[in-house]
């Protein structure tokens, strides 16, 4: 998604926090010259926020700083139900995920604490296809973005602003062969966003895309390049709008 994720993302709280000045990539167990298969490595940090996994390989939390952290809750089927943002171990905001009975739509509601009471500040609805891919994000004002896939990559994003007719918003023209680090069930939660250009919902990483105006004219062309480690894992991911995300890995 995106992002998924400068644009707001489900990392609405994570990615816009104060980043650490320095990151020591040696906490990945992949040494130079000791090449691991990408399948042996999993993401250990996003934007220098350390991830914690539970025994089901679900992300149970992220440590952003000594005072700021997140914790995640799931239902018995493994669907995320809540993302809590904690400051000094006190929940200051959260995102609630409400799934429909057949798991093809999820309502994502963000809550902030105002005078000791939590108030909903935003609500989006994500629609999924039979492969559990996000195919539409609808906002409370009835505007939406709709996604079309090819080879598990988002190739077209259509936009409806609530007034004009739906139009082609962005077309992804080319992808690399590298694996998008967000492309798994545990990590896509980070990229549920309220903008949804869709590059973060793809299996591979977009390297070229074209944005369009509502009248069908080209707005601009974006060429992207990503940085990989020795294992072929993405350590720097760029969005079409120029926002960067940074990843590190732990390898078996």
Image (cartoon, rainbow, N blue to C red):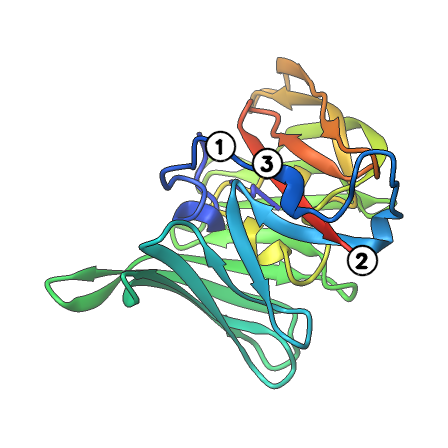
Instruction: Measure how far apart labels 3 and 1 are at the Cα level.
Output: 12 Å
Q: Which residue is mark 3?
A: 246
Q: Residue at x 73, y 62 (%)?
A: 129
Q: Is residue 228 depicted above or below 213 in this figure?
A: below
Query: Do we see residue 183 in this rendering?
Result: no
Circle 2 crowding by C-alpha within 10 Å: few under 14, some 14–19, many from 20:
few
For residue 22, the mark is 1
Circle 1 crowding by C-alpha within 10 Å: few under 14, some 14–19, many from 20:
few
- Across and down, in percent, residue 236 comes to 65, 31
- Across and down, in percent, residue 66 comes to 35, 53
Can you tell which of label 3 and label 2 is closer to the viewer? 2
Q: Is residue 146 depicted above or below 234 in this figure?
A: below
Q: Nearer the viewer, residue 118 or 232?
A: 232
Q: Nearer the viewer, residue 27 or 76?
A: 27
Do residues under tags 3 and 1 come within 8 Å of each other at their CB atoms?
Answer: no
Q: Secondary structure at mark 1?
A: loop
Q: Which residue is mark 2?
A: 252
Query: Do we see residue 209 in this rendering?
Result: yes
Q: Secondary structure at mark 2?
A: loop
Q: Earlier in the sequence, mark 3 or mark 1?
A: 1
- Across and down, in percent, residue 162 comes to 44, 42
């Amino acid at each position: 998604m995106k992002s998924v994720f400068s644009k707001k993302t489900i990392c609405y709280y994570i990615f816009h926090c104060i980043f650490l000045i320095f990151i020591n990539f040696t906490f990945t167990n992949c040494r130079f010259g000791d090449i691991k298969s990408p399948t042996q490595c999993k993401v250990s940090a996003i934007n220098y926020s350390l991830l914690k996994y539970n025994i089901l390989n679900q992300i149970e939390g992220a440590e952003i700083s000594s005072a700021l952290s997140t914790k995640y809750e799931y239902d018995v089927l493994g669907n995320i139900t809540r993302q809590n943002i904690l400051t000094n171990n006190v929940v200051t905001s959260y995102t609630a995920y409400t799934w429909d009975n057949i798991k093809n739509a999820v309502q994502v509601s963000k809550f902030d604490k105002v005078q000791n009471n939590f108030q909903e500040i935003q609500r989006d609805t994500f629609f999924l296809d039979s492969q559990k891919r996000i195919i539409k994000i609808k906002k409370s004002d009835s505007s939406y973005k709709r996604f079309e896939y090819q080879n598990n990559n988002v190739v077209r994003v259509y936009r409806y602003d609530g007034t004009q007719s739906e139009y082609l918003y962005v077309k992804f023209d080319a992808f690399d062969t590298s694996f998008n680090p967000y492309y798994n069930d545990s990590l896509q939660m980070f990229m549920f966003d309220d903008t949804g250009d869709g590059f973060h919902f793809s299996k591979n990483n977009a390297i070229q895309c074209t944005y369009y105006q509502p009248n069908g004219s080209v707005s601009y062309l974006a060429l992207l390049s990503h940085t990989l480690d020795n294992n072929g894992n993405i350590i720097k991911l760029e969005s079409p709008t120029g926002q960067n995300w940074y990843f590190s890995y732990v390898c078996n």
